[in-house]
Amino acid sequence: MELLKDIDVKSWAICFSALMKKSSELTQKLSERVENPVFKVILRVVSLEHSRIAELIKLIFEVEDVSEDAYYSSRCKKLLGEAIIDRIKQACAAAASIMASARSREDVDRLIAVLKEAHDLTKGMVLTLSKVADWPLSRLLTYVASILEQNALLVRDLLEKAFEVV
């Protein structure tokens, strides 16, 4: 935990906001390709939530503008953790693949598992920083993490219901 105290939190905020914005954009694009109407709605909900989180992070850290390219920078990969970013990308790619061809309960269960992993990794990044941040920042970051958790639960519930109409 001592290493986290050396993090430039404003730079972290720029990178995390860019990650959430990029996730929002990619999720929106995926929703346009998915035919299942319930999956389409789920993806749009996730897209809107990620956009909202990006804006919250910008507001909390008083970040004015976040470049779309910030997410791809080596600095952001270092601040957010390249292994974590890669794992989130893998989980999202797996989710997109499963969502495109989900036909069985096992497919939906796999989809729920990979989306939960992506949500947990993202939430973990926020909670880790909240543990070393001073109040009120720590409380605000905990709130953002709770939004991510509620979003994950909503997506899981919607996916379980969606299976009934697949």
Image (cartoon, helix red, strand yellow):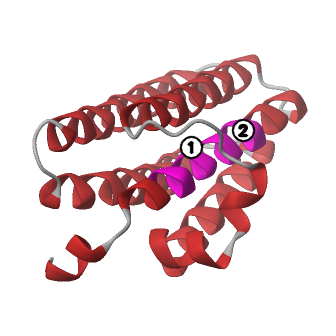
Q: Which residue is mark 2?
A: 27
Q: Please say whether residue 58 is one of the residues in the magenta stretch.
A: no
Where disc 1 sits, the SS reads helix
Q: Which residue is mark 1?
A: 108
Q: Residue at x 54, y 52 (%)?
A: 14
In the picture, the quarter occupied by the C terminus is: top right
Q: Is residue 149 left or right of residue 16?
A: left
Q: Please say whether residue 26 is one of the residues in the magenta stretch.
A: yes
Q: Is residue 163 left or right of residue 39?
A: left
Q: Residue at x 43, y 49 (%)?
A: 119
How crowded pointer 2 is (Cα within 10 Å; few <14, some 14-19, many 20+) is rated as many
**Amino acid identity at mark 2:** Thr
Q: Is residue 115 left or right of residue 120?
A: right
Q: Report the predominant secondary structure element of the magenta stretch.
A: helix
Q: Toward the viewer: 74 or 92? A: 74
In 3D space, how far apart are the residues under numbered discs 1 and 2 (Cα atoms)? 18 Å
How crowded pointer 1 is (Cα within 10 Å; few <14, some 14-19, many 20+) is rated as many
Q: Which residues are magenta?
A: 13-27
User: Do labels 1 and 2 touch, CB within 8 Å?
Assistant: no
**Amino acid identity at mark 1:** Val
Question: Up-down: is 161 above or below 68?
Answer: above
